[in-house]
Amino acid sequence: MSNLVREIEIEIVELNSSSIDADAAAASATAAATSATSASTQATNAATSATAAATSATAAATSATNAATSATSAASSATAATTNGAAQVALAAAQVALATTQANNAAASYDSFDDRYLGPKSSGPSTDNDGGALITGALYFDTTVPEMRVYNGSAWVNMPFTAVGALLVANNLSDLASAATARTNLGVAIGSNVQAYSAELAAIAGLTSAANKGIMFTGSGTAATFDLTAAALTVLDDASTTAMLATLAAAGTGISNTFTLAQLFAAGTAALPSIAFSGDPNTGIYQISADTLGISTGGTLKMTIASTGVMDLPLADMTVYGVSVGRGAGGAATNTRVGYTALATANSGSNTAIGYQAMGLNTGASNVAVGYNALRNGTSTGNTAVGAIVMGNLTSGSNNVAVGYAALSGVTSGSTNIGIGQHAAALLTTGWSNTAVGHQSLYGITTTNSNTALGYYAGQGVTGDQNTDIGSSAGTSSTSGANNTTIGYNAQKSTATSSNQFTLGNSSVDTLRCQQTSITALSDSRDKTNVIDIPVGLALIKALRPVKFEWNMRDGAKVGILEGGFIAQELQAATTAANAEWLGVVDARNPERLEAAPAKFLPVMVKAIQELEARIAALEAI
């Protein structure tokens, strides 16, 4: 029976043409100025000639009258005065002709001037004042601009002149177009020679000075005066901080070389902190209460510092070098987050997230996530994830525990699962109540339930339900079978798809040790039916061949070990011949590794003994 027990994991103005350069422009300007002067002289001469002509005309008229009178007189004495009268008539005619010529010359000079200076106009004329064609060099004064303009033969252009050396208003009384350079040349450079405009200086300049007054800024670009007390004047007159402190101490203020801020500043408020900044009076430091400082920005308390060293950010989380510390989005009082964008989405509270994007998009409650992208997604509750990308795809699953890189990393809606170890149950999605402890343990399960694996690679290939694999590599060959148990290093069930098997150890185990030699199994009559006397006995036992043999396992697990027992093929043949395969003595589900359970012959052996006892009794009765 011991053998039976042993078999059980720029434009520059174009002037005349685009090729005329600045020197030509200057020459044209000089010529135009000369033309203007000449025209003006000619106009004056013409006017003088016109006046002279008019005078000559008057004289001529007078001479004509005198001639007429002389003619009359001559007529009276024709013979005596014929010669003299003719001479005077000729002289008068000559004088009239001269006057006429002079008048014509004056008119021509005036017309020439009138063609060259057209006078004031509101815009450039297209003809001269007589309606004739414009001549090159003609001038007019444009009353609209206003400026003098000259006709260049094709168009009216600005009257050019050379500005070199001129002090122009447009150039800041300088011959330079650059205002900054002009100021520098004039010795009034801003910041070096003169002060730039300052609203603060303007504000101070607008104050009225008086004795014993101080100046203070009341806002940006605004200032006011305040009274300086005798004590203040005494302190301000001191040459050093030490002297100031000595003056204050002598004045009985209680301030010494070890004075405190409280002796200098009022407590202040968040809206008006006692220590603030110019132009930003609602940002600074103030005293909240004894031994507690507050820092406010924009009139709102943002940070408190207690004498215990505790710092608090009452309104927002704190970020240190990109790492956020606080309550996370939504600010739930029961949340704790440490990490960049950890708890970045408003959630239901009672969550703890530590690590980059830990629970970054999760909106659930009562979860713990520690590690890069741990529990990043989902709406679930009660999950614990420790490790990088642990349960990173969870959506609605709850009450899962995962520890280790990528443990339960594929779980979506699965619940009550435990995965401890790198890639433990990493492919599990919707399955529930699975426990995987060990590197890649239960790695292959996806939607199955109630599996347990403990050990490196334990149950790695399992895809079925309710399997238990304990031991390194235990159950690695299993796939779809259910309700199997393998215990021990590399313990494997008979086939990958077998169900309802319990395997102790691997093929190298040669001793099963237990204080009890029997295994108790269910045998209640209330659980059995169709009970009859066993139909096989002595004949089947006699067909068995107990053997002594030496192990030479093909996988090398056991080699050279002597034992006694049976040959599975012989047991199979015997039970088949006796029509007793139902005994299940031989497990042939894996034809490459037949297994035997000789202990199942116990009922048959009892029957055989009974048969022998009957024979003995019969013989004794003879």
Image (tube, rainbow, N blue to C red):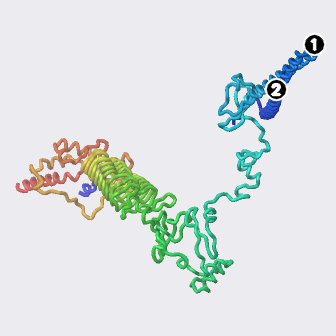
Q: Quadrant of residue 221?
A: bottom right
Residue 362 shown left or right of residue 285 in the figure: left
Residue 471 location (% of width, % of height)? 35, 56
Task: Give the image location of residue 232, x and y in percent.
Answer: 61, 79
- Quick one: quadrant of the N terminus? bottom left
Tag nearer the camera, 1 or 2: 1
Q: CA distance from mark 1 to mark 2?
A: 31 Å
Q: Say which of 119 and 135 sits in front.
A: 119
Quadrant of the rendered image containing residue 202: bottom right
Is residue 427 among what the camera can see?
yes
Q: How many marks?
A: 2
Q: Nearer the viewer, residue 323 or 250?
A: 250
Which is more N-terminal, label 2 or label 1?
Answer: 2
Q: Position of residue 606 (x, y in %)?
A: 15, 54
Instruction: Between residue 96 and residue 151, name the one nearer to us.
Output: 96
Does the rendering let one see residue 456? no
Indicate left or right for 236 with 331 as reference: right
Q: Quadrant of the C terminus?
A: bottom left
Residue placed under numbered mark 1 in the picture: 79
